[in-house]
Image (tube, rainbow, N blue to C red):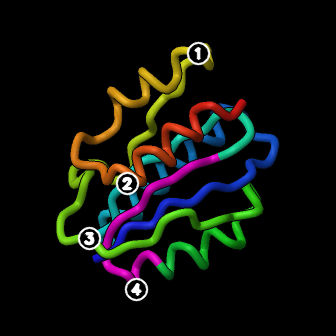
Amino acid sequence: MRQFTYISTAAALAESDIDAILESAQTRNPLNDITGFLLYNGRNFLQLIEGPRSALMTLMVRLAVDRRHSGIVRLEDHPITKRVCPEWTMHRIQLSESVDRRRDELDQALPPALDAVVRRTVLNFASLN
């Protein structure tokens, strides 16, 4: 089992588009044994996905041609023995409007078992606006 964390640049999206992304992921991911979470700051996505390597690679290929975002950069890719978000088929973690409060609020919302390096990457994303 592996865990990927990536960022990408979002196209011009409405809130309904984000809802559709989440709905699709929550339907498809259980069929492929994928779990994870999504952050969206209005310009960029950060997503953590975990599951069998082959399922993650297939998902990354599909994401690469998804017109709702571009410029995918995989930041983390490492083997895991245990999921950090086993119950989240795809969970959206909301970012506060206040950039000053985002890091603290996000730190509280992240799974406690999240690897320290991945946690730092995700918290740094919160500073982007």
Residue corresponding to mark 4: 54
Density class for disc 1 (Cα within 10 Å; few <14, some 14-19, many ≥20) is few
Task: Give the x, y percent position of residue 20.
Answer: 57, 46
Whether pointer 2 and pointer 3 mark residues with C-beta atoms closer than 8 Å, the reply is no
Residue at position x 23%, y 40% in the image: 112
**Residue pointed to by mark 2:** 36
How many marks on residues? 4
Q: Nearer the viewer, mark 3 or mark 4?
A: 3
Given this view, does label 2 or label 3 mark the residue nearer the observer?
A: 3
Mark closest to the chain's N terminus, 1 or 2: 2
**Distance (Cα) linking label 1 and label 3:** 32 Å
Extent of the magenta region: 45-56
| Image quarter hosting the C terminus | top right
Question: Hey, what amino acid is under mark 2?
Answer: Gly
Among the two numbered marks 2 and 3 on one chain, the one whose residue lies closer to the N terminus? 2
Q: Secondary structure at mark 4?
A: helix
Amino acid type of the residue that numbered disc 4 sits on in the rendered structure = Ser
Please state which amino acid type lies under the numbered disc 3: Ile
What is the spatial separation of the Cα atoms under label 2 and label 4, in whole angstroms? Answer: 16 Å
Please determine whether, in this image, residue 54 is positioned above or below residue 32: below
* Residue that label 1 marks: 100
Residue type for callout 1: Asp
Q: Quadrant of residue 35?
A: bottom left
In the image shown, does 55 or 125 lie closer to the viewer? Answer: 125
Local SS, label 1: helix
Q: Are marks 1 and 4 in contact (CB under 8 Å)?
A: no
Question: Disc 3 marks which residue?
Answer: 80
Q: Is residue 50 magenta?
A: yes
**From mark 2 to mark 3, how far is it between C-alphas?**
13 Å
What is the distance, in whole Å, between disc 3 and disc 4 at their CAs?
Answer: 14 Å
Count residues near mark 3 (Cα–Cα under 10 Å), then give few for <14, some for 14-19, many for 20+: some
